[in-house]
Image (cartoon, coloured by chain):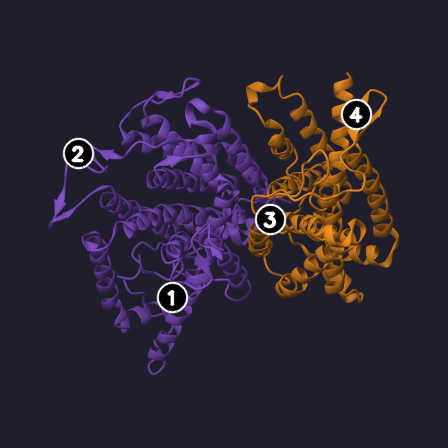
Chain colours: A purple, B orange
Amino acid sequence: MSDTLSAPAGATRRTPAANGTAARRSPARFLKPLVLLALLVVLLVLPLYVEEFWLRTGFAVAGAIVGAIGLNLLVGTTGQLSLAHAFFLAVGAVSYTFVSGESGGLGTRAALRGLELPPIVGLVVGVLLAGLAGLVFSPIAARLRGIYLGVASLGLVFIGVHVLNTWTPVTGGFNGRSVPEFSLFGFSFGNDDPQLFVLGVPFREAERLWYLGIVLALAAYLFARNLLRSRPGRALQTLRDSEVAASVMGVNVQAYKARVFLVSSMYAGLSGVMYALSIGSIAPESFGLTVSILFLAMIVLGGLGSVAGAAWGAAFVTALPLVFQQFADVLPLVSAPGEGGVAAGIAARYLFGLAIILVVLFEPGGLAGIANRFRHRGRRSARSPARGAPGAPADPASGTTDPAPPGAPSDPPSDPPSRGSSSR
Amino acid sequence: MTQFLSLLLNGISLGAIYALIALGFVIIFKASEVVSFTHGSLLLLGAYTVARLSDPLGFLPAVLIGLAFTALAAFLVERLIINQLRGAPVISLAIVTIGVDIIILTELIRQIGPDILNVPHPWGGDSVRIGSVGISENRLIAMGVAGVLIIAFFAAFKYSSWGVAMRASAEDGEAAALMGIRQGRVSALAWIVAGVLAAVAALFLVGAPTPGVSAAAYTVALRAFPAAILGGLDSTGGALVGGLLIGITEALAAGYQDQLSFLGRGFGEVAPYVVMIIVLLVRPSGLFGTKELTRV
């Protein structure tokens, strides 16, 4: 999941000339696909070698990557601060569990209900329902500016947790309920059925989910990347920079806000399903405000507006507490729960808080910004002897999906800007 | 009827506490354009300090130190972080306060653990009856103190030079700066005042009928956010109205939860957010907030 392109947000600020010459001259052009390929191969063969813990962490990270990319579309690209991500995650997770889960007794008082449909149906319904929830909330979201939206969306999280606690037949109530295993056309992602051995290594739940995670995260990544490079993506970025400018350019502000909410919450829904699969059960406390804040931490650390950055941020934030826990006895200051010292989860939270502050203070571009800076530095020194003429034709291989030169904020509409839509 | 009056009175007293928190929230926003998500943990910090110190030092010194400590924390946050980010986008500022909140809250929760710390209020957990309506003494005193503080605040806001300076900077920061108003000082003072208000609110929030200081107090403090938002983020009067509205809503929803059982138990805790979302649907800038105008 390496950074194949510079941050999409930054893409609008670079000149076409710099883009073209750099891509044509630097060996990075040939190197990059190779590195990516190698990375993919490593990811694919990893289950043959590493322990179950890392595979489970990997699937959790993949789920977080999907969610973070979705939130980043909303917060980073469009500039709509949302703390409601946990709510949409919950919608996805609960829908999946309800649609694919079995009806059954939970003691004598409350009976759980479930539709017992195939898990793939549950997954699709989960994603769609989360999108629907986003769409229902979007009229409110579209009317509210930045910070009002942030606090209003806070309300959604509390309402969500309340519903999870009280709607027992569907959600399992306070104690939650267990999540059905995923399966695809008869192939179960559980521990057996069918028993599977690859090169003598048993492929059980963790190994199978690992591949599912890679596929879903990669799909989420590619979709978001292409979205940002297309006309709607440009429109969203313009919307973040100035709503007035966007509406003058012919961007329908309300409609785009609603759509980005839809897409973002569908991402959250998928992430919720993956989260449920990775934990194996859902409970109200898994979808509280903390989760929303952690997702915000992921995209801030990764770099607002950058798809690859969101992925790195998600990996960092999700894996860190787990890794801390794993190595609790080796690391100084960190200890297993129950002993003196700082518990792993808590130590990780300090680090996140500190990292957020430092990133906003010193490197607002986050991890993606740092990566970009290094890349540009290398590029500048390589290019300095022979500068390409300004306006050199862009490399056809570098941006075939680009409808507009990266210098333009968005492709100008062919019809004259509508004056009526700008607010006065 | 008695039940209704009693719930109403309790709601108003709770609302007065919320109003104090919301007021701090609003003046921070007016002075430095920051939506401070740190406010919940500042409040918990105040409550924790008072609870920890009142055993060795006695109640009154503990309260004074608690107030000072919370104000100091707010001041440091402003100086060390917010002031460095002058002119940054509102969202970045909000996010950085979330970062601060994570750190303070994590540390406090680690310190408090699963315990409930008791704050030995001199007025204890008794309740008084006014006619047929009962209310805890703590809440009654809270109402009085909040009333006095709010009046004092509005007087200062209207007449003192700090108040004038702050209103001027909120109106047009650049013009105010050109007139010789030191923005940094205005903003720092606003954070200090907000810290004190939050600590006072904390003092009463953890008294009867609440059992004491626990991590749950943070969730309670968060309910002041809808209060500030629904009154209008940049309206001090709105914070007052919003606080009362939220307090009354919560008390009524909790009191009548048997009649509202179809909404599930504990609906009182989410009722403030429901009210907020409904109000925002009708008035996107809150009840008294200035509408954002865009000039092209």
Query: Can you tell which quarter of the image residue B169 is in?
Result: bottom right
Q: In the picture provided, is B97 more to the left or to the right than A88?
A: right
The quarter of the image holding the N terminus of chain B is: top right
Tag 2 and tag 4, C-beta contact below 8 Å: no
Cα distance in 3D space between marks 4 and 3: 31 Å
Residue at x 83% of width, y 56% of height = B164
Residue at x 72% of width, y 53% of height = B53
Chain letter, disc 2 residue: A
Residues packed near mark 1 inside 10 Å, few (<14), some (14 to 19) or many (20 plus): many
Residue annotated with mark 1: A16
- The three-letter amino acid code for the residue at tag 2 is Asp
In the rendering, which numbered label is found on residue B134? 4
Q: Are marks 4 and 3 on the same chain?
A: yes
Instruction: Tell me where residue A177 appears, x and y as whole percent.
Output: 39, 30
Cα distance in 3D space between marks 2 and 4: 65 Å
Tag 4 and tag 3, C-beta contact below 8 Å: no
